[in-house]
């Protein structure tokens, strides 16, 4: 692999760094690392199978959530979505998961913790961000373009409930030919959060909207 190219001037520049095998409970992926020039952040791609043959690729663009992905937090649905996405890619034998280091919808871990404290005092997830002086969602998906282009991917079967993510990737030139819902079980800790994502951020969270094949998510 050579350096990732990001041709338009407004696309953040990434360097492709290296890759290694990454065995998981569900499949042996190849893990690829990139570094974003502007921030020094290391973004990851987990790839399985031949994703560069022109066929639509089952894809997850996952935003970092240390509390949910690593520390088993039940406040959100991130960890279950991460596992569900990897299982679906393994079942298909082909796909890609981008792990983007945009923790806390782009505000960072400590600010997300501050937002959680405000939520403990009654704010919802959007109000808490606004009270801290941030946008409801501070993420930027432009670096997806050089990352997926690195693997020759242009058409996606995107695992998401987030219509803004579909819009963002479409504007970047990707053909999102299918949306694959990633619905997880609600619990007493994440119920209000999931309701707010649906009401204020437009997420498609209804079971009737799901087309999951394995019945798990
Ligand atoms: N600021 C903030 N960020 C949160 C909160 N809960 C989760 N996050 C972050 O939100 C991001 C995940 O966003 P979601 O809206 O759940 O998911 P999404 O990726 O946009 O949509 P899906 O593709 O459907 O999962 C991760 O970066 C989490 O760290 C919260 O209460 N406040
Ligand atoms: Zn989370």
Image: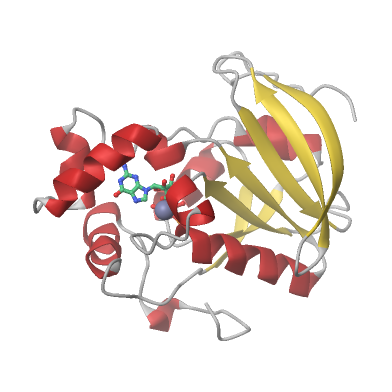
- Percent coordinates x, y for residue 51 in the rendering: 83, 53
Q: Please identify the residue farthest to the front as the structure is shown.
A: 71
As drawn, is 209 to the left or to the right of 82?
left
Residue 90, x across and y down, in percent: 76, 69
Q: Nearer the viewer, residue 215 or 155?
A: 215
Tell me which corner region of the image, top left, top right, bottom left or bottom right, holds residue 28: bottom right
Residue 215's x, y, as percent?
A: 56, 86
Q: Residue at x 59, y 20 (%)?
A: 12
Nearer to us in this view, 46 or 121: 121
Question: Is residue 118 in view?
Answer: yes
Q: How is the image coloured?
A: secondary structure
Relative placement, left or right, of 153 versus 112 is right
Considering depth in this image, is 56 or 23 the residue closer to the camera? 23
View extreme (bottom): residue: 215
Q: Residue 63 at what x, y percent from top left? A: 50, 45
Task: Establish if 207 lies above or below 134.
Answer: below
């Amino acid at each position: 692999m050579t350096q990732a190219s990001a041709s338009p001037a407004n696309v953040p520049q990434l360097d492709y760094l290296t890759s290694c095998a990454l065995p998981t409970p569900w499949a042996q992926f190849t893990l690829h690392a990139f570094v974003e020039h502007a921030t020094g952040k290391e973004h990851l791609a987990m790839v399985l199978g031949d994703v560069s043959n022109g066929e639509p690729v089952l894809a997850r663009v996952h935003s970092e959530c240390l509390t949910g992905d690593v520390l088993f937090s039940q406040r959100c649905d991130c960890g279950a979505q991460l596992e569900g996405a990897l299982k679906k890619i393994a079942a298909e034998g082909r796909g890609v998961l981008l792990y983007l280091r945009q923790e806390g919808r782009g505000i960072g871990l400590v600010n997300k913790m501050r937002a959680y404290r405000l939520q403990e005092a009654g704010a919802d997830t959007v109000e808490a961000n606004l009270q801290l002086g941030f946008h409801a969602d501070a993420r930027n998906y432009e670096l997806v373009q050089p990352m997926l282009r690195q693997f020759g991917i242009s058409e996606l079967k995107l695992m998401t409930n987030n219509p803004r993510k579909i819009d963002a990737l479409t504007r970047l030139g990707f053909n999102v030919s299918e949306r694959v819902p990633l619905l997880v079980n609600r619990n007493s800790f994440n119920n209000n959060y999931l309701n707010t994502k649906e009401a204020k951020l437009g997420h498609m969270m209804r079971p009737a909207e799901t087309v999951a094949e394995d019945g798990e998510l």
